[in-house]
Amino acid sequence: MPGNAVIVLAWVLMAAWAMAWAAGWWTGGLHGGVLLGLAGLNLATFWAYWTDKYAARQGQWRTPEQTLHGLALLGGWPAAWWAQQLLRHKSTKPAFRQVYWATVALHLLATAGVALAATGHLPAALALLHR
């Protein structure tokens, strides 16, 4: 994707993701602790990128890429995107970026599946896929 399209996609996905989580909390279907956990996870994800960038500059032990991808998959993908942009870290490595976007897609699909299951709408959503 061209640079501007990726930025727009990231912003749209982050906005939709945040609104979905906030709506879950607002309607009482989601405990506030989950939102705090997601906030903490995103802070930890940004910190992991920052420490990896610092270690790279110092020639020190690096954070494994699997760890960075795991944090993104668990829900830290917005902070991972921001860290990539603001720190200019892992932002030009094509293989890393491909796996990163795959983790975003998997996280969003899993989140949607959990939300649909929790609200009882999963059978209807699956039925739409079989049409």
Image: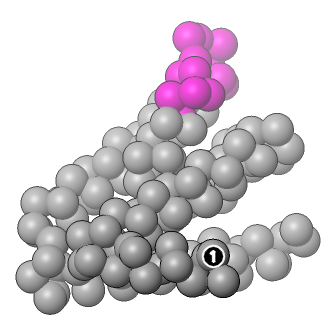
Instruction: Check the image and report above or below for 23 versus 86.
Output: below
Q: In the visual, does 121 lie left or right of 104?
A: left
| Residue lying at the far right of the rendered structure | 2
Name the residue rendered at 52%, 79% in the picture: 127
The quadrant in which the C terminus is found is bottom right
Q: Amino acid at mark 1?
A: His
| Magenta highlight on residue 32 | no
Q: Is residue 53 left or right of residue 41?
A: right
- Tell me the residue at 63%/76% (across/down): 130
Residue 58 lies left or right of residue 67; in this view the side is right
**Is 91 above or below relative to 122?**
above
Query: Where residue 51 sits: x, y (%)?
Result: 48, 31
Return the x and y of residue 126 as percentages of the image width and height: 51, 73
Q: How is the image coloured?
A: one colour
- Residue extent of the magenta highlight: 54-68
Q: Can you say which quadrant of the picture contains the N terminus?
A: bottom right
Where is 13 relative to 95, above or below? Answer: below
Instruction: Tell me where residue 61 sits by quadrant.
Output: top right
Looking at the image, which is closer to me, 124 or 61? 124
SS of the residue under disc 1? loop
In the rendered image, is residue 55 in sight?
Answer: no
Q: Which residue is mark 1?
A: 130
Find residue 21 and report its horizontal and vertical position in percent: 30, 75
Task: Give 49 or 58, whichever is nearer the viewer.
Answer: 49
Q: Residue at x 9, y 82 (%)?
A: 28
